[in-house]
Structures are given as structure tokens and as C-alpha cells.
Image: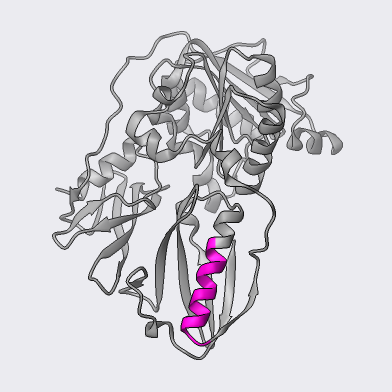
């Protein structure tokens, strides 16, 4: 994670700057920052004679040179104000420019406002979930120029490498979304996606990590809704137990139908991705699952939440949904930013919002989240 360490004996509480917001719970503050392509938050805390200035990953920025430069500049400002000096950092230039990434990016704030389909040029859409370095999406998009492809990936470095590949090939039919794919599907129109590809997902079979599993019952039902009639979900995995669990969920909780000779077939082809090459070197068997949609889903409008919201409860847990204000941050002008967790309680989202003196929640540039059905319902619970 991008960070800098400052050595000083001056406490951070001595800083007087209306652009920083001190926590009401802990000895730390946050600073909202906006640069050419990104809006994000840095978190600053003190450990004895050292101050740590760290990117807050909640805001999901692409970690490019302009983000690193802004964090380093803020750390230099703090060091000067607090009579200290920077003793270490990992903010050196890597010549990764945010501009070319922006050519491919679907910003989540625009997705929340308009839905995914309204941001696309084509009504022929295919989606890869967990696109990694983009090898599969690159070749598939080159072979199908009439189709618009969307790659969803949360990890920074693989996504940057994918964007470099797309730019080098001059692709114009690819877009990327940098977020957790489990929240994305509610923002697609029903019956609008030709295919959902899932290549070598992490099984997350350990009990403490199982909540992170992508193809669970809820996500598969959402995928069913967005697929067109005749559209497919295609899974490749080296983990037979995972393939079995996905097929069981598809058979039990969806109306999708097996589209190959066997529900779980051995894959003889190649998609030439990093993980496929890795598993083939280890001589693992690759399994393929393909299920087809045979019944059209009922169409419906994508719900939207109108801000500002009058917050009447700081914490509510009901029907598997959670809304909780984790911390309140305040600046010298009595302005407030709150850190909130919300959505499905087993796998909630986190984001920052502004909070008025009359307890109205409002969006700030650093409010990065997906307004999926669970998020909207949990935010509504806080207003009751």
C-alpha cells in the first residue's frame, strides 16, 4: 500500500489545517485528496515518534504516478508543518499514467447514476469477472470487434497491466470496472449480457474466507437475471470441488441449463491466461462449466437512492443487512466526514460520506461504492 513515514516528536494534533479531518474515536486523521484522474483519502496516524501517511484503500484509486505524487506531496507538507522529515516511503515514480486508464474506465459514480448499459455504445455486451491481467479479454475482444467487453477486477497491478495491453493494441471495444464484482450485477439491465466469463476464480474454501466466494447462490441468481435468453455463464477452474459447488448452486437456485455433454467437462482448449499457464505447468486438470439461460427474466427499473439522506440511526442490523457509522471525522470548520459500512452484513461495503450538522448524509468525491440492491436497502434502513 502506498505510504510514507515521517519522523518527528511533534504530535499530529498540533496540525492546524481545515482540509484534514480528525477522528472522534482514535488518534488519527484523514485527508480527502483529488488529483487529475482520482479522488481518494489518505489516513494519517502516529506511532511514538513516527507518523504514517497511508493511502486508504476504501476509495479504490488506481495507484498511478499522480496518486503517489499527491501522497508524497502531502507527506512533505506534514513533515514541514510538524518539524520532522520523511525517513522512508514507497512512492517512487513507476511511469504509470492515469490518463490512458481513463480511456477504458467505467467510473462507479457514473454507474450508480446511469447504470452500466447506458454507459456503453453497443447492446452486445460480454463480461469477464476477475479479468486479472487481461490476456483472455484482449484476445476475445480482438476476435469480436462488434461486441463490447467489460472486465471487472479489484486488484490494482493486474488491472493496470491489462489497460496497458488494451492501449497497445488500440482496442476500442473494452471497458473496465475497478471494484468488487459481487456488487456490480444489480447495475446491469435485465437480459442484457451475452456471456459472463469467470476464469480461475479463487475458491475461498477456508471457513473464515468463504464469504469472499464469488460464485455463491446470491451472485449466480444475479448473473441469471442479467444474461440474455440464450446467454451463458462459462467457468474455468482447476478445482473440482469448486466446480461441483457452482453446479450444485446453479441447479438448485437458478433456471439455467447445462449447455455441454457433462455438467463438469474437462477443458481441452486454451485461454492463455496467467493462471491457466500456471496450472498447466503443475499438470493440473482444467474443468469447464457452461450453463445457458433459457427463460427471459422480468425487466425492471434499477433503483436509485436520492442524496442527501436524513440519518436517524447510527447502527442498524436487520434482515441480514447492516448500516453502521464506524467513525466520525471533523475539521476545524466543524465540517464532518463519516466512514460507513453498509449492505449485506456478511459482506458489506465501506465508503466515506459527508455529514451535515442536521445529520444528513451526502456524497463527496471520495464516496466510492456500488449502489447495489443491498446497499440501497441498508441505507434506507438508516433513515427510518
Determine whether, in the image, residue 127 is placed left or right of residue 87. Answer: left
Q: In the image shown, does 246 or 159 lie closer to the viewer? A: 159
Q: Residue at x 61, y 55 (%)?
A: 65
Q: In the image shown, does 15 or 199 lie closer to the viewer? A: 15
Q: Position of residue 120 (x, y in %)?
A: 46, 22
Whether 88 is drawn above or below 249: the answer is: below
Range of magenta residues: 70-83
Q: Residue at x 51, y 87 (%)?
A: 83
Q: Position of residue 179 (x, y in %)?
A: 50, 42
Q: Position of residue 223 (x, y in %)?
A: 47, 25
Whether 112 is drawn above or below 362: the answer is: above
Q: In the image shown, does 81 or 219 lie closer to the viewer? A: 81
Determine whether, in the image, residue 266 is placed left or right of residue 317. Answer: right
**Residue 238 visible in the displayed image:** yes
Whether 378 is drawn above or below 196: the answer is: below
Q: Position of residue 351 (x, y in %)?
A: 38, 53
On the image, which quarter does residue 235 sit in? top right
Quadrant including the N terminus: bottom right
Q: Residue at x 76, y 33 (%)?
A: 276
Tell whether position 75 is magenta: yes
Amino acid at each position: 500500500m502506498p505510504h510514507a513515514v515521517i519522523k518527528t516528536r511533534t504530535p499530529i494534533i498540533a496540525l492546524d489545517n481545515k482540509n484534514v479531518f480528525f477522528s472522534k474515536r482514535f488518534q488519527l486523521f484523514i485527508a480527502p485528496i483529488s488529483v487529475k484522474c482520482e479522488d481518494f483519502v489518505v489516513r494519517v496516524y502516529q506511532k511514538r515518534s513516527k507518523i504514517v501517511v497511508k493511502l486508504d484503500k476504501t476509495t479504490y484509486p488506481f495507484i498511478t504516478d499522480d496518486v503517489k505524487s499527491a501522497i508524497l506531496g502531502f507527506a512533505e507538507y506534514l513533515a514541514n508543518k510538524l518539524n520532522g522529515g520523511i525517513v522512508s516511503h514507497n512512492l517512487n515514480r513507476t511511469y504509470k499514467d492515469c490518463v490512458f486508464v481513463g480511456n477504458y474506465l467505467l467510473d462507479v459514480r457514473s454507474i450508480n447514476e446511469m447504470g452500466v448499459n447506458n454507459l456503453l455504445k453497443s447492446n452486445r455486451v460480454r463480461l469477464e469477472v476477475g479479468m486479472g491481467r487481461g490476456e483472455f479479454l484482449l484476445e476475445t475482444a480482438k476476435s469480436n470487434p462488434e461486441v463490447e467487453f467489460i472486465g471487472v477486477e479489484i486488484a490494482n497491478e493486474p488491472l493496470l497491466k491489462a489497460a496497458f495491453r488494451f492501449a497497445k493494441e488500440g482496442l476500442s471495444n473494452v471497458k473496465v470496472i475497478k471494484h468488487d464484482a459481487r456488487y456490480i450485477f444489480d447495475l446491469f439491465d435485465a437480459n442484457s449480457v451475452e456471456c459472463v466469463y469467470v476464469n480461475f476464480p479463487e475458491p475461498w474454501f477456508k471457513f473464515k474466507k468463504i464469504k469472499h466466494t464469488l460464485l455463491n447462490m446470491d451472485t449466480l441468481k444475479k448473473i441469471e437475471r442479467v444474461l440474455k435468453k440464450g446467454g451463458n455463464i462459462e467457468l474455468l477452474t482447476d478445482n473440482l470441488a469448486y466446480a461441483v459447488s457452482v453446479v450444485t448452486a446453479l441447479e438448485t437456485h437458478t433456471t439455467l441449463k447445462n449447455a455441454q455433454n457433462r455438467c463438469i467437462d474437462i477443458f481441452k482448449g486454451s485461454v492463455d491466461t496467467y493462471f491457466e499457464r500456471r496450472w498447466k505447468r503443475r499438470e493440473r486438470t482444467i474443468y469447464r462449466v457452461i450453463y445457458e439461460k433459457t427463460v427471459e427474466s422480468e425487466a425492471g427499473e434499477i433503483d436509485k437512492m436520492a442524496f442527501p439522506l436524513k440519518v436517524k440511526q447510527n447502527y442498524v442490523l436487520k434482515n441480514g443487512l447492516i448500516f453502521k457509522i464506524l467513525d466520525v471525522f471533523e475539521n476545524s470548520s466543524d465540517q464532518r466526514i463519516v466512514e460507513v459500512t453498509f449492505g449485506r452484513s456478511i459482506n458489506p461495503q465501506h465508503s466515506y460520506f459527508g455529514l451535515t450538522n442536521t445529520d444528513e448524509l451526502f456524497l463527496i468525491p471520495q464516496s466510492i461504492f456500488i449502489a447495489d440492491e443491498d446497499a440501497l436497502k441498508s441505507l434506507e434502513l438508516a433513515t427510518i
